Image (cartoon, rainbow, N blue to C red):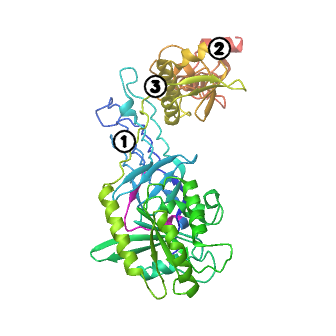
Amino acid sequence: MTTFVDRVVLHLQAGDGGHGCVSVRREKFKPLGGPDGGNGGHGGGITLVVDPQQHTLLDFHFHPHIKAAGGVSGAGANRDGANGKDLTVPVPPGTVVHGEDGEVLADLVGEGTTYEVARGGRGGRGNASLANTRRKVPGFAELGEPGDRIDVVLELKSVADVGLVGFPSAGKSSLISVISAAKPKIADYPFTTLVPNLGVVQAGDQTFTVADVPGLIPGAATGKGLGMQFLRHIERTSVLVHVLDAATPEIDRDPLADLDAIEAELSAYGGLEDRPRLVVLNKIDIPDGRDLAEMVRPDLEARGFRVFEVSAITREGLKELVYALAATVAEHRLATPEPEATRVVVRPRAVDESGFTVEQDEEGVFVVRGAQVERWIKQTNFDNDEALGYLADRLERLGVEAALGKKGAKAGDPVRIGVQEFDWQPNAGEFVSGPRGTDARLEEESHRASASQRLAARKARRVRSDDELLHMAPDGTVTTLANAKRPVLVTDEDDEDDTGE
């Protein structure tokens, strides 16, 4: 038997964007080929789509982790990486998506309704896209942005025309089992039904659905019993049917008291005042039940309810009840527009939104917050000096350095942007083209020797000191020192001077 699951927590991970590529075109007879690093592909997103064939969230209960594919990194020869494949996840109609803080993100009703719940990361730009008049051959590329990693709660609110409500053991499961093909669990003890049951009922040429909501008790709207867990399943019903036990063995209970108690819980839950209501007096096959039903029926009709005396065992009165429900549902459908696919309106922030704030926390760290600056931090390779210089130029143009100065930041003060914390150094002049991957403005802070420094060191090793000069022996042979690199001939005059003659 399929388990009914109506609430799950999903752990979603959208795909990361691919990294950009650093590449320079090398071809025979074309020494100045220029940069040709391609862009990284975008990561795959995760989208929920309403599928009428889905009736439960059971699959997510066993597989709560969903991950989309990441983008492929770019390559040389201006080859862009492939985008990660988007994931489409089917959910039942009536699924409500909640954020981690309980905020309702989307209410998915209607076939084909979609909602992108996790967005994939943007791919990083390659050095071909970053080239400009100042940086003709960039020695760096942007990193791909990470995709969304969020947890969401899915809640299922059944979409049914008729909702059966009542105390435990009032006979709701027995009633739905005889008017439809549903086969709920039926037993002679309270709270037999632990999950809502859905049944399809045929009345002439009209078809409607009935939901059997697990038994309610006083205090259900505040969490007692199973009511709070399943009251949401009657929010979308068109008609409410009170199933009252006319043969209850409990002395302190009677149909009128049960009706008042359930109405009090529905009122406390809220949002159900406008639903038409019918009353079913069940179990009239028992003599005491029939007598009690005849006694309370006038009082119920005086309150304005349509009352039906039925027996799920002998099926007495069921035909009249079914056709009355069909007529009530038809009236409600005529008065209510046909439900359309939910139009989910998402208003994300602009990718290039330039707003930012600068605040100093209790530890003295200057914290810069802003969508754009935090995105730049994610795209920067902090192991590349030229990439750091490029980031510094962008922050300066945006006004971050000026804002830090106004807040009292000085050179060497800690600054945090996103997850990256560093010691702030004001931008020192304009970028000057140099060896790829380097920035002359950062040479004082870099522990890695530049290309010019390495070249000078190699030349220095080739210079020999005076004590490494080669000498010629009297017999005309050349004598060299062990660490000499090449022979050096000495004239006779020099030789005479050396011997003292």
Q: Is residue 368 above or below residue 36?
A: above
Residue 440, horizontal then vertical, whole percent: 53, 20
Nearest the camera: 254 or 462? 254
Q: Looking at the image, is mark 2 or mark 3 earlier in the sequence?
A: 3
Residue 150, horizontal then vertical, whole percent: 54, 49
Please rate how many residues cluster around mark 3, counting C-alpha atoms within 10 Å: few if below 14, some from 14 to 19, many from 20.
few
SS under mark 1: loop
Nearest the camera: 452 or 206? 206
Question: Do labels 3 and 1 touch, CB within 8 Å?
Answer: no
User: What amino acid is labelled 1 in the image?
Assistant: Gly
Residue 335, horizontal then vertical, whole percent: 32, 56
SS under mark 3: loop
Q: Which mark is residue 408?
A: 2
Cα separation, mark 1 vs mark 2, equals: 44 Å
Residue 102, horizontal then vertical, whole percent: 56, 48
Does residue 300 appear in the picture of this structure?
yes
Relative horizontal placement of residue 414, taking residue 73 as reference (left or right) = right
SS under mark 2: loop
Please rate how many residues cluster around mark 1, counting C-alpha atoms within 10 Å: few if below 14, some from 14 to 19, many from 20.
many
User: What amino acid is labelled 2 in the image?
Assistant: Gly
Q: Looking at the image, is mark 3 or mark 1 earlier in the sequence?
A: 1
Question: At x 59% / y 81%, what residue is drawn?
Answer: 247
Magenta part of the chain: 45-60
Residue carrying label 3: 354
Question: At x 41% / y 80%, what residue is drawn?
Answer: 318
The quadrant of the image that shows the C terminus is top right
Q: Is residue 210 above or below residue 18?
A: below
Cα separation, mark 2 vs mark 3, equals: 22 Å
Q: Which mark is residue 76?
A: 1
Question: At x 30% / y 36%, what residue is drawn?
Answer: 28
